Image: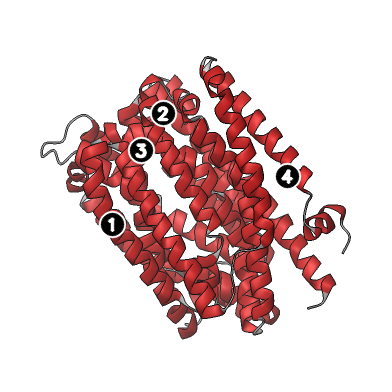
Amino acid sequence: MNRHRSASRNALIAGQAGISYGGFIFGQAVRFAFNMAVARMLGEESLGVYALALAVMQIVETFGVAGYDAAAVRYVNIYQAEGRKASDAAGLAIRSALLMSLVPALLVMLFSAPLARLFNGGSAPLGGGGTLLHFALLSYALAVPFNVVATVAGHALQGHRDLVPKIVATQLIAPVAMLALTLLLAFADAPGPALLVPYTAASVLSCLWIWRQLRLKTGTGIREVLGAPTDRRMKAFAFPLLGVSLVSIIAYWLDVLLLGMLGGPVLSGLYQPAARTAGLLRALLPAFSGIAAPLVAALQAGDESAETGRLYRLVTRWMVLLVTPATLFLMVLPEPVLLLFGPRFSASAPALVLLAAAAFVQSFGGIAGTVLSMAGHGRVTFLNALVALAVQVALSVLLIPLYGTAGAAAASLGAMLLLSALRLLQVSRVLGVSSFSAALWKPAAAGAGTAILLWLCRPWLLGLDPAVAALTGVVIASAVYLALILLFRLEAEDRELILGKH
């Protein structure tokens, strides 16, 4: 492998992943603020309604996308040199996903009342949170086609190795519009519209923006979407991934949905801040897998297994390096973060500890799922996800009645441990590559030192104002971890990247 080519690829991954992760962190931070605003201004029941409605919509949107997001990345990248063929691939993916999204969106509208009863603790008559959930499902369902088009269009641009439009649409325009509209309507003393309107309005805005970017950057417009010829290879690639994505998104939201079924919107609302906070850690995976996916697809198409392994280990190391200090902070000091949402939410501290651990396990698993999918093993990834979902359902049904929000988080952690183990083993067996490298001892040692110091500071920090304690804890964790990593010395690849020496 040409050393200059390898260094250039490292720079591409770091640059695009840096943009992506920065965007994801910003977007998640704004969504964190949105959840905090809803919790403080509208109450935990309204926050639970939002979480439940969002869970249903994301499952519906995943069904609508139908694996065409990954198909767009793969085939736009493969056909990139052929111009028109790449545009046809993007157009076919958007058209197919849009048509797939219309049916489930209409079904949600038709069955919004039974769904609201189901997730209102099984209560037969609608009232209070159940009525609000009914209207939220109706309102949010209108956003489904817009979100599906925005998702696939963003992935088509990603196939051209340009992540910026996707990040701007999904992590800047959508969350900022949601937060701004929610605050505006809440201050205008319109609590109902403050919960029902912003999600749909933000979806329309982000879709219109990214559609314009797709047309300007690639020439793909309405004519290309309507006239794109059918590509059987794309469909054969996409549909197995529909199963993977659908099972994965159900697993992601299963805890919230089961908490609603068993305890109603209030219990889901108390859990949502812990889930959203841990989601800040999970943002790292799509940031890196987003840019790594087309690179892995190209390497596998060129039968470059050795370089695939090097890329796989590099990305895993970077992910573990970045996610460790934040994971430790949330596991040692969950209470100050949750108190920002209100006094009642501190009871979910055990749930946040477990969810942070689950997010770390997901990051440590690296991009194993992406590597398997881009190498053409979509059925394997689907079976993995299906097995993990079955385990999570069983654990949730067992643990939620006993331990509430902590039981839901424990079920998520158990399922993630199993899923990561399966993926790591299969990538090793099927492709002959491993995510483990000797350099992983450095974040492990730095993390251990950071955790010990945070634990020693915990009694003092818990005596401070929650906002001050959270900020101080972040500073301590970041500074100590960075100092230890520098003490252990950066890897040669990292120094080359930072210094720009290829």
The residue positioned farthest toward the left in the image shown: 124
Which residue is at the front of the view, 30 or 136?
30
Mark 3–mark 4 Cα distance, whole angstroms, equals 40 Å
For label 4, the crowd category at 10 Å Cα-Cα, with few meaning under 14, some 14 to 19 and many 20 or more, is some
Kind of residue at badge 1: Leu
The structure residue drawn at horizontal position 47% and vertical position 67%, both measured from the top left corner, is 423
Q: Earlier in the sequence, mark 1 or mark 3?
A: 3
* Residue ID for mark 1: 106
Nearer the camera: disc 1 or disc 3: 3
The structure residue drawn at horizontal position 28% and vertical position 46%, both measured from the top left corner, is 257
Q: Are marks 4 and 1 in contact (CB under 8 Å)?
A: no
Residue 441 x, y percent position in the rendering = 65, 53
Nearer the camera: disc 3 or disc 4: 4
Which residue is at the front of the view, 239 or 94?
239
Q: Are marks 2 and 3 in contact (CB under 8 Å)?
A: yes
Residue 38 got which mark?
2
Rendered position, 192 above or below 27: above
Q: Are marks 4 and 2 in contact (CB under 8 Å)?
A: no
Q: Is residue 140 visible?
A: no
Nearer the camera: disc 4 or disc 1: 4
**Dot 4: element:** helix
Residue 378 x, y percent position in the rendering = 45, 75
* Residue ID for mark 3: 50
For label 1, the crowd category at 10 Å Cα-Cα, with few meaning under 14, some 14 to 19 and many 20 or more, is some
Rendered position, 236 above or below 130: below
**Dot 1: element:** helix
